[in-house]
Amino acid sequence: DIVMTQTPLSSPVTLGQPASISCRSSQSLVHSDGNTYLSWLHQRPGQPPRLLLYKISDRFSGVPDRFSGSGAGTDFTLKISRVEAEDVGIYYCMQGTHIPWTFGQGTKVEIK
Amino acid sequence: QVELQESGPGLVKPSETLSLTCSVSGYSISSGYFWGWIRQPPGKGLEWIGTIYHTGSTSYNPSLESRVTISVDTSKNQFSLKLTSVTAADTAIYYCARSDDYWGQGALVTVSS
């Protein structure tokens, strides 16, 4: 199985300041079709995960542009340009290139 | 607006079969996409169980493959999960999802006698 490793696991942030989460995969996530199926999801307490970004950097419908993604191969980053109160929760990276699809451990973002 | 809703028993006895159904509205399953199940033990991370393509082709997590069946009923626009021989370790919130973009609210299934 592809192991997805997120850092940090906890991120206290100040409102209005940027935040960044790293995700590293144990193998390249480039699919044979040329796409890289790396997604970022956000989960608030008691809620299902919500898709933020797919294929590394494409924002899903309705996702604010303060969320951005970058990376290639095995190293990926989620950036929040200015953290807002509604951004608290757990962020997961997920790979859909290899079976089984796998998730990172999650990064908890909270306000200082 | 694509919406998914899980349904099924919230309590299953050890060694029995867990059965859940996901009802989809706002999109026809037969039009495409992968349709899958993901679970999350209370307070823990996410685990992919498996997916079914609209053609009926399935992929399962090897860790669960011997106990899992995912099927689709396009006439009802639903897909289902069966997990056999359950134990307490299968206690989790079970989510159905369209690929990774639309998710149901989740169904808590507890395995207990």
Image (spheres, grey):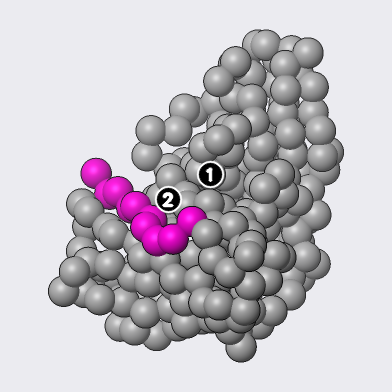
Query: At label 1, which amino acid type do we have?
Result: Pro
Residue with the most extreme left position: B75
* Residue hosting label 2: B103
Q: Which residue is mark 1?
A: A49
- Type of residue at label 2? Trp
Q: Pointer 1 indicates a residue of which chain?
A: A
Which residue occupies the foreground of this view, B110 or A94?
Answer: B110
Q: Is residue B68 left or right of residue B57?
A: right
Marks 1 and 2 share the same chain: no
Q: Is residue A69 above or below residue A97?
A: above
Check disc 1: other Cα within 10 Å, few if <14, some if 14-19, many if 20+.
many
Determine the residue positioned at 81% across, 33% down.
A10
Mark 1 and 2 residues: CB-CB less than 8 Å, in contact? yes
* Residues in magenta, as a range: B1-10
Distance, label 1 to label 2, CA atoms, is 7 Å
**Neighbourhood count class around disc 2 (C-alpha, 10 Å): few under 14, some 14–19, many 20 upward:** many
